[in-house]
Amino acid sequence: MTKKTVILLPNTQQVLQKMGVNIKKARLRRNIKAEILAEKAQISKSTLSAIEKGVSTVSIGAYAAVLYSLGMDKDFEMIALDEEGKKDYWEHNFQLRKRATKRKRQKE
């Protein structure tokens, strides 16, 4: 089976490279050897090296495993967080319910 090549925009590639650098910095700040982190994330050392370089052909699952192993899985949840989109949705689709006015009972 041949690998499919994904063509990324230069900005997207830069984002992946920056994410890789950030992952490497987090590993080094925690004084974790690459071999140990790769074992903990259940990936090969070469895959970890590719992640730290921001290689786009690495599976998102491998990125998730590394972030979890570093205790950064909450950061991973922030990737697709669309607060602005949620705000726009509620502003355009949320309709406030209006209560009917209470009628006063007339005394007979």
Image (cartoon, grey):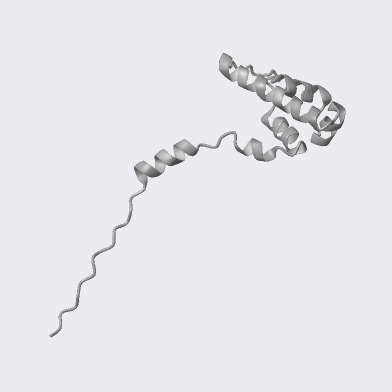
Residue at 63 percent of width and 16 percent of height: 5
Please indicate whether residue 54 sits to the left or right of residue 41 in the image.
Answer: left
> Relative to residue 8, is residue 24 drawn left or right?
right
Could you tell me which residue is drawn at 28 percent across and 62 percent down? 99
Check the image and name the residue furthest to the bottom: 108
Residue nearer the viewer, 55 or 72: 72
Q: Residue at x 65, y 36 (%)?
A: 75
Q: Residue furthest left?
A: 108
Which quadrant of the rendered structure holds the C terminus?
Answer: bottom left
Q: Quadrant of residue 55?
A: top right
Q: Residue 82: x percent and y percent?
A: 51, 36
Q: Nearer the viewer, residue 53 or 29?
A: 29
Q: Left or right: 88 with respect to 97?
A: right
Task: Classify residue 31 by image quadrant.
Answer: top right
Count of marks, rendered view: 0
Residue 7 locus on image (x, y percent):
59, 15
Report the residue at 33% width, 50% height from top. 95
Residue 1 placement (x, y as % from top left): 71, 20
Residue 98 drawn at (x, y percent) = 29, 58
